[in-house]
Amino acid sequence: MVGNPKNLSDLRRIEAALRVTCARCGRTGLYDRETLLADRMTHQLPTDWESMKTGFQCECGARDSHLLPVPFADNVPELRRRRNENVLINLALQILRDAAYRSSSQAVGTVEVRLALRVLSPFVRDQNTLIEFWRSATEEPRHPWTSCTALTTGSSSGCSIGAIR
Ligand SMILES: [Zn+2]
C-alpha cells in the first residue's frame, strides 16, 4: 500500500489495525479494524479515510486525529480480545432486539434472553437497564401493551442500548 488508504476497509489487504493519535494532545490508541468497520456500518457512519480522521473524540475533547495503519496486527492479543467482545455484544443485542420485537405477542423471559443480558452485564454502565429488561420480559400477566421494545430503542425510562460502551 503506497500513501494513505482510501478507506478503512483497505487495511484488510495488509491485516492492519489502526493507530489513532490525537492531533492536539498526542494521546494514542490502537483499534481493531473489523470492530471499527462493524461499528461504523451499524451506525451508518462513513469509513473513508478523511472522515475517519474526525471520527474519534479524544479525552481532551479534540476530534482531529492522525491515522496510521499498523500492518499485520490481526493477532495482537488485546485487539483479538476486543474483537471477540464486540462479536459477543452484537450477538447479545440481536437476541434482545428479536425478543423485544416478539415481546408484545409472547413471553420472552427465555434462557437465551437471560444469557444475552448476562453477556452484556460487564459492558453496561447502568445495570438497572438489564434488570428492567428482564422484568419486562418476565412480567405476568402479559398484556398486549407489555413490550420490551422501548428498552432496546432507548426510551425515557433510561433503558437504552446506547448505555453500552
Ligand atoms: Zn487529545
Image (spheres, rainbow, N blue to C red):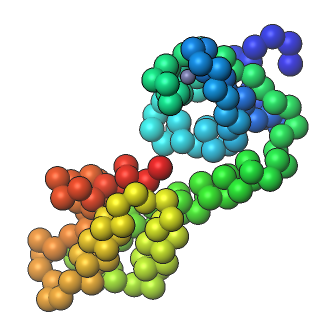
Q: Is residue 75 left or right of residue 139?
A: right
Q: Is residue 54 above or below residue 72?
A: above
User: Does residue 43 appear in the picture of this structure?
Assistant: yes
Could you tell me which residue is drawn at 37 percent across and 49 percent down? 162
Q: Residue 155 location in percent, x, y?
A: 21, 54
Q: Is residue 12 left or right of residue 157?
A: right
Q: Is residue 148 left or right of residue 43?
A: left
Find the residue positioned furthest to the top: 3
Nearer to us in this view, 153 or 118 = 118
Q: Residue 34 location in percent, x, y?
A: 68, 42
Q: Is residue 136 above or below residue 70?
A: below
Could you tell me which residue is drawn at 67 percent across and 29 percent down? 28
Could you tell me which residue is drawn at 31 percent across and 74 percent down? 131
User: Does residue 13 appear in the picture of this structure?
Assistant: no
Which image quarter holds the N terminus? top right
Nearer to us in this view, 137 or 164 = 164
Q: Is residue 31 left or right of residue 163?
A: right
Nearer to us in this view, 5 or 122 = 122
Q: Is residue 159 above or below residue 40?
A: below
Picture quadrant of residue 32: top right
Q: Residue 95 location in percent, x, y?
A: 45, 68
Could you tell me which residue is drawn at 12 percent across and 75 percent down? 144
- Where does ligand 1 appear, by image quarter? top right
Tally the numbered discs.
0
Q: Residue 164 location in percent, x, y?
A: 43, 53
Q: Is residue 159 above or below residue 30?
A: below
